[in-house]
Image: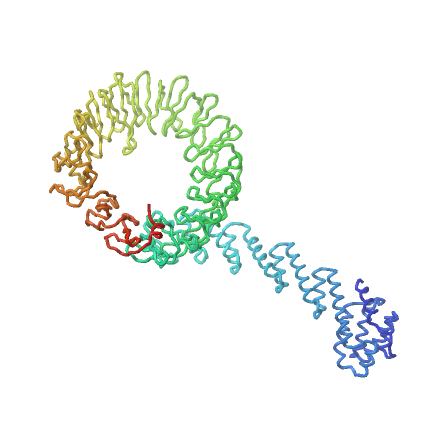
Amino acid sequence: MKFKYYIVLILIWCIPFSTQADRVTRAYKSLVKDKPQKAKELLDKELKKNPENAGAKYVYSLYFLHPANEAAHLDSAYKYVLAAGENFADTKKSTLKQWNKLGINAEAVAGKKLQIDSLAFVQAAENNTVIAYQYFLDNYPTAAQYTMAVESRNELAFSQAQAAHTHQSYKQFLDTYPDARQSQEAKKLYDMLLFESQTKGGDIRAYEKFIAAYPKSPYRKRAEQIIFEMYTAPHTIKTYHDFVKKYPSSSFSDRAWLWIYFLYKRDNPLENFLKVYPDFYNPAYARKLIAAEKLTYFPVYDEEKYGFIDAKGNLQIPITYDSVASEYFCEGVKDDFILVYKDGKISAIDKTGKAILDYSYNHIEQLDEGLLMVEREGRQGLYHQAGFEILSPNYDLIDLLEDTFLQVTLAGKTGLATLNGRKLTPLEYDAISSPGERLLIFRRADKFALLTYDKLLNGKDTSLHFDYDKVEWIKKGYIKLITGGQQSIITTAQDTVIPLTTSTIHALPVGWATETAGTFQIYTPSGKLLSDSVFTEVKGNNSFYAVKHQDKWAILKKDGTWFGSHTFDWVNLLGNDWFIASQNGVIQVYSQPDKLIKLTDVEKYTFQMLPQSPGQFWLITENKKGKKGLYASKTEFTLSPRYDDIQVWEQDLFKTELKGKTGLINTQGKILIPAVYDGLNYQSGQIATLKNSRFGLVSLNHSVEIVPAYTALLKKYDPAGKLFIANKEGVYGLVTASNKPVTDFAFDEIRYWQNDVALVMQDDTWYLYHISEKRNTFKPMEEIEYVKQTEEEIVLKVYMDKKYGVLSNTKGLLIDCEYDDLRNVGTSDYPLYVGEKNVKEAGVFLVFYIDKDGKSIRRQIFDNDRYNSIACE
């Protein structure tokens, strides 16, 4: 054994040669003479007679270390040297003195123990196995090398666990060596691999089982996150609400609720939110946020800091920020989040003052409702407006794709994630697009692949096959694929309609046509051959196919049957459900059900439909002489060609022109307006007339009758239409519906203010003119600007005597004209006015905040430098 080499050195160093003739001495001498067996016999006799003889035990330990001893054993030597140490205290002093002459004393025993400890550790280190180190630790627990052996054993055991790299291997390590230095790392690896192992199925059920089995795992939240991202991938209110009902204790339940809030307010009034969702997780916060989002906010300044007030002057956001977005000083806060600055960094808060982001970004902007794009060091990330991260700022570009996906780009490659941040594809595609209809087109180099939204969101069969040279959205629900010179048609759900063919495929309104060497065949929408016939030309609408064969046309119905045995010289399809054809020189038009109406004396026609009359059409017909008539499909009313022109205005209203004069008739041919005018123009029940270059206005019910006497089209003045704005030779006045003047024609412009007071302009100055009293009722206004213009109220910003004020048609002068500048930073419904006065003598600007009723609610003073930093252009 290797340790015998070390024993020889020990013996040479430690054995003295002056001995006494007792058994211990003789045994010692026998060892020196390389007679271990003789020494053993002496020692056995001595220990039999005196079992507590410390000297005999010490020499016995030397016996087990002697190189000439075939029974040499390190553990036995260790056993006897320890026993010797225990018995020395009970040995007589005379004996100790005698033994000491031989070097047998307590110090020698202690030294021998240390030497054996070292020899045992060297032996373990040379083996360098967990078993060897554990053997040393078990048998030499008091050795100075114990800690070193523990560390070496643990390092080897951890390496073995790493080599296996399974959650079982790390679990075994942790159970066996709980106090190991590597236990923390082993625990992390165990938790990670256990999570991966237990959830390798990848579906929601696997993550649910993991949470149930390991509720205290550090990966519980990750499992909850994946369940949340997978369950809510469709990004609808319903999926988020279903999630909170199914997983009420999930750490992502609040996040789902916040998405519900922001999706709801896109299309619904927020005041109803808590009525619809009374189980919202934080109704107090929702009430506060709903109330805040209705308010108009404007920044205020105090002691080098900024905050925000509402339109009533209430301080809504404390004055604590170094700066705010500059546009707020000119426009107020238009969004439902606010950008603020501290120490040169930008952050965002909601309108309750709650922080959304920290101050670590260089740029923040809204990507979509509820989504804030952030930028840091040139990289983009995404946050929900409620303050939780969706994508870390690691991308060159983040954008929306069809309001369903986040398209992320890095180093020229792009991929997709859900709107709640779940990564759906790797970043390895050159382009991703969508033609709509829940289909995605991926491009890699010059090849294309397809994948439906549903497959991608559900994580099922998401493999991509880049088999196509071109992908073309051909019509709603269908895609044309081109590869290797062949074409095919599939649905947007990726079901094959027409397999790959060398023919060219054309889309028809209903079905398909394949073209081969100038001939066509027709297929149904599902790809079934509709007719065995081959045609030289094909046209289609929703009900019919017009097909040509041997210079004749026929009509094939969409069900594959023929429209009788008719053949035509030509066929034109009309709209979705009709056609017109010529047979032996006679023009005929289709009328339901399956009949043809002959149109006599017709050479040409113009097809016309009205949006307000679906399912009906009109033909403006024309004979050889250029005279025009009319055919109405719904009533089969026919007006023989006798007019120079006919226009369809409404279902029962037609403008006619004959010998340069225009009039109106209905489908019964009744004259509604005689053809005595040079022109007519229809205006929602009223008809503008033109005669001898003069304009008038009439209504079909004769409530308005204004003869053509004016040089411009007349316009309604008041909502009820009792007065009209008329123009004579470039100046305006007001007339009644019966053409009675109520003002002089003396104005450059007239606008509605009140029923009896008009807003008029003369010589570039605006006045309020009392119509019946024929006088101005307010000071001249050099400029006006509409703040609000509704049926309920008109509000103007006015400029008089080089100062600004605000004037209402229902409340009068709201704000006196005393400001050097004045602007509305709120909305038309909730205005907040900011008025400015320049006090040049003091070198300061006074800024006044004024509510919708004209009440000053706050005043601030700015020096020139501060004012210039926030001044609007």
Q: Where does residue 604 sit, x and y in percent of width and height?
A: 29, 20
Closest to the observer: 293 or 670?
Answer: 293
Q: Where does residue 794 sit, x and y in percent of width and height?
A: 22, 45
Give the vertical position of 463 relative to 255 (above or below): above
Q: Quadrant of residue 156?
A: bottom right
Which residue is rendered at x = 45% and y = 31% of the image? Answer: 527
Image quadrant in which the C terminus is located: top left
Which residue is rendered at x = 41% and y = 28% of the image? Answer: 508
Which residue is rendered at x = 58% and y = 54% of the image? Answer: 193
Labels in figure, total:
0
Can residue 578 be seen here?
Answer: yes
Which residue is rendered at x = 36% and y = 29% of the image? Answer: 543
Closest to the observer: 388 or 215?
Answer: 388
Q: Is residue 224 left or right of residue 843?
A: right
Can residue 279 be seen here?
Answer: no
Q: Is residue 864 left or right of residue 855?
A: right
Q: Where does residue 188 sit, x and y in percent of width and height?
A: 57, 58
Q: Quadrant of residue 535?
A: top left
Colouring scheme, one of rainbow, by chain, secondary structure, one colour: rainbow
Q: Is residue 553 left or right of residue 645?
A: right
Q: Where does residue 44 sit, x and y in percent of width and height?
A: 83, 75
Image quadrant in which the N terminus is located: bottom right
Give the vertical position of 684 relative to 338 (above or below): above
Farthest front residue in view = 841
